[in-house]
Image (cartoon, coloured by chain):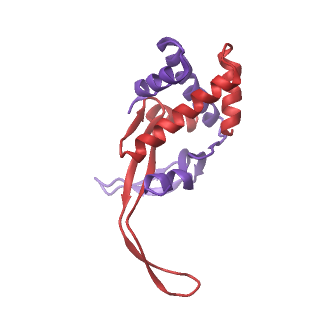
Chain colours: A red, B purple
Amino acid sequence: MTKSELIERLSYNAGELNKKEAEVVVNTIFDSIGNALVNGDRVEIRGFGSFTVREREAREARNPKSGEVVSIPAKKTPFFKTGKELRARVNNGTV
Amino acid sequence: MTKADLIERVYLKTGFSKKESAEIVEMVFDLMKDTLEEGEKIKIAGFGNFVVKGKASRRGRNPQTGEEIEISSRKILTFKPSQVLKGAINGES
């Protein structure tokens, strides 16, 4: 399912919500989560999961083509932890 | 940030009532959960992909007793953030 399919299904399921409105809702949700993460905040959606930002330490790596050692700077990466309810549902209802 | 904050943002952005905003936000996550439960992946451009993956069964060990146990095969949900989101978090525009 893509974002536009999610928007279509939302508009269909919600009845009184037209596509334009559904689009605003879906964009608002993902923009808000993204902005919170950019600000270093944690986002917790009960029953779904939580989004946090994890720090990756700087490390040395090798360019596999040239064999040259390159240093990779520390960076941040978004991390999603699946909530209990969803984890069980994805695994056919079993924990 | 919690679901209540998301509802507030939707309320401010759309002009729906708080009750309607709450119902709609709930509906979005319900749709996503239903889709993932079916094993279907979700691709949100500019944000990331939610993908259900199968994990094979493997031998594990109870770390407390050292006893060998069988860890059954299972399905797990993974999130792969988009380059756009990763870039934004690292202060790239």
Quick one: quadrant of the N terminus of chain A?
top right
User: Would you identify the image quadrant in which residue A35 lies?
Assistant: top left
User: Would you identify the image quadrant in which residue A3 lies?
Assistant: top right
Q: Position of residue B62 (x, y in %)?
A: 35, 53
Q: Using the image as rendered, state which of residue B36 and residue A39 is in the foreground.
A: A39
Q: Position of residue B40 (x, y in %)?
A: 67, 40
Q: Position of residue A49 (x, y in %)?
A: 45, 37
Q: Using the image as rendered, state which of residue A47 and residue B76 is in the foreground.
A: A47
Q: Using the image as rendered, state which of residue B64 and residue A11 is in the foreground.
A: A11
Tell me if residue A95 comes above or below residue B25 in the rendering: below
Please report the residue visible at 68 percent of the width from the left and 25 percent of the height from the top: A20
Please report the residue visible at 51 percent of the width from the left and 34 percent of the height from the top: A86
In this view, the residue farthest toward the left is: B64
- Does residue A95 appear in the picture of this structure? no
Image check: B74 left or right of A35?
A: right
Tell me if residue A71 comes above or below residue B13 in the rendering: below
Tell me if residue A5 comes above or below residue A63 in the rendering: above
Q: Position of residue B45 (x, y in %)?
A: 63, 45
Please report the residue visible at 39 percent of the width from the left and 30 percent of the height from the top: B2
Q: How many marks on residues?
A: 0
Please report the residue visible at 47 percent of the width from the left and 38 percent of the height from the top: A33
- Does residue A34 appear in the picture of this structure? yes
Image check: B16 left or right of A61?
A: right
